[in-house]
Amino acid sequence: MTKFISIKKAQDEAWKIYDSWRKAGGINCPAFKCKVRISLLGWRHLIGASGHKKRISDDVYRRLKLLPHVKKIIENSKLIQNIKKKNGQIYYTLEGMLEVEENKVKALRKIRVVIIEDFKKNKIFLSVMDRK
């Protein structure tokens, strides 16, 4: 399977999950005591479809593979690990240690979920990333 086909397949699988969260109205988060909204802003950010910074295909693929873990981290987070204000935008970070499979090998990874706050104080999913 070529790299393009595997990224396209991962994107299709991830979109089904992402869209189901969107249609459900978001994911409940104990840390915020509200639902985290799932919008196209986060999807476009993940796949590098908008903004000034395009993502390389390996980065897009890795983030798409991490997407199924986002719901678990949001639902189980009782604390916000980091709050950062940049250019008037507030960024919140939730983290969790989860087992992730890469190249058919499972390993514990720190997965970081980034959530932003809009002008109405809604919390909106923006991104997911991992650290070895």
Image: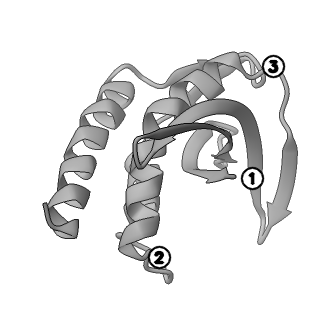
Q: Nearest the camera: 83 or 96?
A: 96
How far is the residue under mark 2 from the one under mark 3?
Answer: 31 Å
Please name the residue that numbered disc 2 is placed on. 51
How far is the residue under mark 1 from the one under mark 2?
Answer: 17 Å
> Callout 3: helix, strand or loop?
loop
Q: Nearest the camera: 2 or 23?
A: 2
Examine the rendering and report whether any part of residue 48 can be seen.
no
Please name the residue that numbered disc 1 is placed on. 91
Kindly check if marks 1 and 3 are in contact, taking CB atoms under 8 A apart as contact: no
Q: Which quarter shows the N terminus? A: bottom left
Give the image location of residue 113, x and y in percent: 64, 43
Circle 2 packing at 10 Å, graded few (<14), some (14-19), many (20+), is few
Q: Which amino acid does label 2 sit on?
A: Gly
Q: Which of marks 1 and 2 is nearer the N terminus?
A: 2
Q: Which amino acid does label 3 sit on?
A: Lys
Please name the residue that numbered disc 3 is placed on. 78
Examine the rendering and report whether any part of residue 18 can be seen.
yes
- Quarter-of-image position of residue 17: top left
Q: Is residue 54 above or below residue 123?
A: below
Q: Which of marks 1 and 3 is in front?
A: 3
How far is the residue under mark 1 from the one under mark 3?
Answer: 17 Å
